Image (spheres, rainbow, N blue to C red):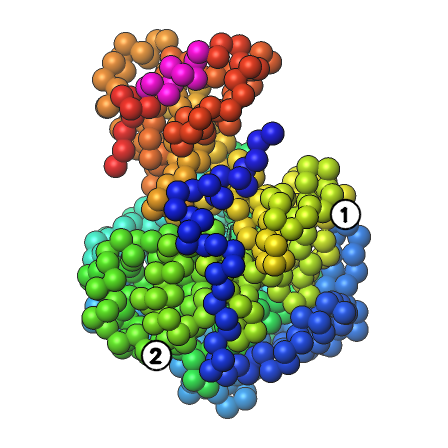
Amino acid sequence: MYRPWGDRMTEKGLEALFSETRQFAPSPDFVSRANAHADIYGLANADPEGWWRQQATRLSWAKEPTTTLEWDLPNARWFADGELNAAYNCVDRHVENGLGDRVAIHWVADQPGEERTITYADLHRMVQQAANALEELGVREGDRVAVYMPMIPEAVVALLAVVRLGAMHSVVFGGFAADALASRIQDSDCRVVITADGAFRRGSVSPLKPAVDQALESCPGVEKVLVVQRTRTPVEWVDGRDHWWHEIVERQDPHHQWRAFNAEHPLFIMYTSGTTAKPKGIFHTTGGYLTQVATTYHYVFDHKPETDICWTAADIGWITGHSYIVYGPLINAATQVMYEGLPDSGGQDRWWRIIESHKVTVLYTAPTTIRTLMKWGHQIPAGHDLTSLRLLGTVGEPINPEAWVWYHTYIGGERCPIVDTWWQTETGAIMATPLPGVTATKPGAAMRAFPGISLEVVDEQGHVVGHGQGGYLVITRPWPSMTRGIWGDPQRFFDTYWNRFEGRYFAGDGAKYDDDGDLWLLGRVDDVMNVSGHRLSTTEVEHALVSHHAVAEAAVVGASDEHTGQAIVAFVTLKLSATDAEADHAQTIAALRQHVATVISPIAKPRQIILTPELPKTRSGKIMRRLLRDVAENRQLGDVTTLTDPTVVNMIAGLMGTHSSDD
Ligand code: PRX
């Protein structure tokens, strides 16, 4: 049997580093306010609904909810008769409580030297003006607004202004190409797009507005485009449709009267890759989502609003940015660093300079970035004072123990607990994590479910497996921030998540509880790849490849990669008519990689493309991707007996070294 979760256990050198008994005790000197009740797990698990009802009091409700959970699988409604406004909770109420002078965002630009400090009072004014501007542009309750922006404060303002009006944002990561942007705008039928002229990346400009212009050629439903001037690069302009942010927003009245919306009012859509070529529009609603992001932010980061300077080093274009740059921190009145650039914009020590100068206390990032920083060498952080840090977090993919230990030793000075947080776009907020000051940690383990969350590991038949055995991770109870569905496709929502194991949510991840009962995540068990923390589907990349005129067939697999976690490896057969014309393999491969970048995004470029005259297929004509994965990972081949021609896969293994490209 194929055991996807087996792979990670046999990686070289892993056993030595992460023997399951190697524990890091919760630091005794970790004075934790959030964890003042040691028995928070007992409390929550004895009465999960009561616990979440209690947590909902972190929000300011215009109408207090009298109900907690209504569950009609797969449809959950949390706090369903309550009413609130998300933007009011993130901003206005803090100003009303006298916190207007507190810094909300220390914004740090891509290039050193440019910074902005935005207090809660500033944010309040900016959000109200932006809300008025959006109203002027015709945005109404229930509308969808696409956001395609760099990491600048206006991105946070845009999101809050949209939800203040009861509209939904659909943020598309700025690294996506025009086609990918267009399909997302069409799928959710957005009326307005908020963007910028361009984004800075290591000092050079990466254009955004031109991609929007191109995307909108196939999006007739978009009436208005609001453009922030960031790079001052010349852009094309469509009169009547396009408006500069600084012209329309800054002349607005700084007062905007918020309205309360129902707790189940839709808040945002976030597209993510599933197992088919079409990305899923995962949508979240207001009361439950905000409750769980607020609660997890408070406990997992042991948040101390008066003294913490938190930095979630993620992009707003992904769920981590939504939950732990925008909603979680702002509801908690946190002070944050928001950084526009790449880890080496302005030098390989840029991150450490930021931490040193802003006295960052909590750093939350992805294993892929930690591995990059590690590759540059520990002498780089060693040259900076990182003693302000008190807690480190990681998210997005399994963290390899080498990276965990490096993070702990060289960044955390062996003093900072590490929270390895497992969750998904669909879960909305953290679901599994150690709690600092309470839970011991093991390098590479997410340790346990967050209070109020119930996770199990099951076999193919849905039976719970014993400690020490791998299986599928399922969530056994609804949780407040769970997605309410796939936009426009309730059947797909049920089929993807709720139909595999009766009554339980299928996460798509392999996992195991070790002999101590601690949870380990073992990677995806479906056709979803995790490349540098970016979630991509194999089918999406296959579709992009076969849309190239020379390609007959393509099979894509995610192969383990030391730096990116997984890397994309594509096996491609060319059309007969194309084989002569494409005789220069290196050139063809380069063209195909570029084609994928243009159709999806540079993040989806295959690491390797192998041109092969044939793909391994079963007698029923199905491509055997599992064997291709064995080839890509240089492993002994699994069972080949069901193949029409078992020699094909050996031939492909032989080609790996010759007809491939790496960069
Ligand atoms: O495979 C898991 C992995 O990332 C997937 C979710 O990706 P996305 O929706 O893009 O959200 C990422 C940020 C929350 C999961 O199904 N994943 C996320 N966090 C971890 C992880 N795998 C192992 N350990 C984690 N801490």
Residue 653 sits inside the magenta stretch: yes
Q: Are marks 1 and 2 in contact (CB under 8 Å)?
A: no
Q: Residue at x 60, y 72 (%)?
A: 295
Q: Which mark is residue 258?
A: none
In this view of the protein, which residue sits in the foreground, 96 or 220?
A: 96
Camera-side residue of 352 and 110:
352
Residue at image point 51% right, 24% down: 638
Q: Which residue is mark 2?
A: 388
Residues at marks 1 and 2, CA–CA distance in whole angstroms: 45 Å
Q: Nearer the viewer, mark 1 or mark 2?
A: 2
Image quarter where the N terminus lies is top right
Would you identify the image quadrant in which residue 508 lies? top right
Please state the extent of the stretch shown in magenta in the rendering.
647-655
State which quarter of the image contains the C terminus.
Answer: top left
Residue 264: give x, y in percent of width and height: 69, 62
Residue 546 visible (yes or no): no
Other-residue count near label 2 (Cα within 10 Å), few / some / many at <14 / 14–19 / ≥20: some
Residue drawn at point x = 39 percent, y = 42 percent:
12
Q: Is residue 625 left or right of residue 574?
A: right
| Quarter where residue 379 is shown | bottom left
Q: Amino acid at mark 2?
A: Ser
User: Left or right: 312 with respect to 74?
Assistant: left
- Where is residue 150? Give x, y as percent: 35, 58
Residue 464 drawn at (x, y percent): 72, 47
Q: Position of residue 148 (x, y in %)?
A: 41, 53
Disc 1 residue crowd, few under 14, some 14–19, many 20+, Cα 10 Å: some
Q: Secondary structure at mark 2?
A: loop
364 left or right, relative to 268: left
Does the segment drawn in magenta span residue 138? Answer: no
Q: Main secondary structure of the magenta part?
A: helix
Residue placed under numbered mark 1 in the picture: 503
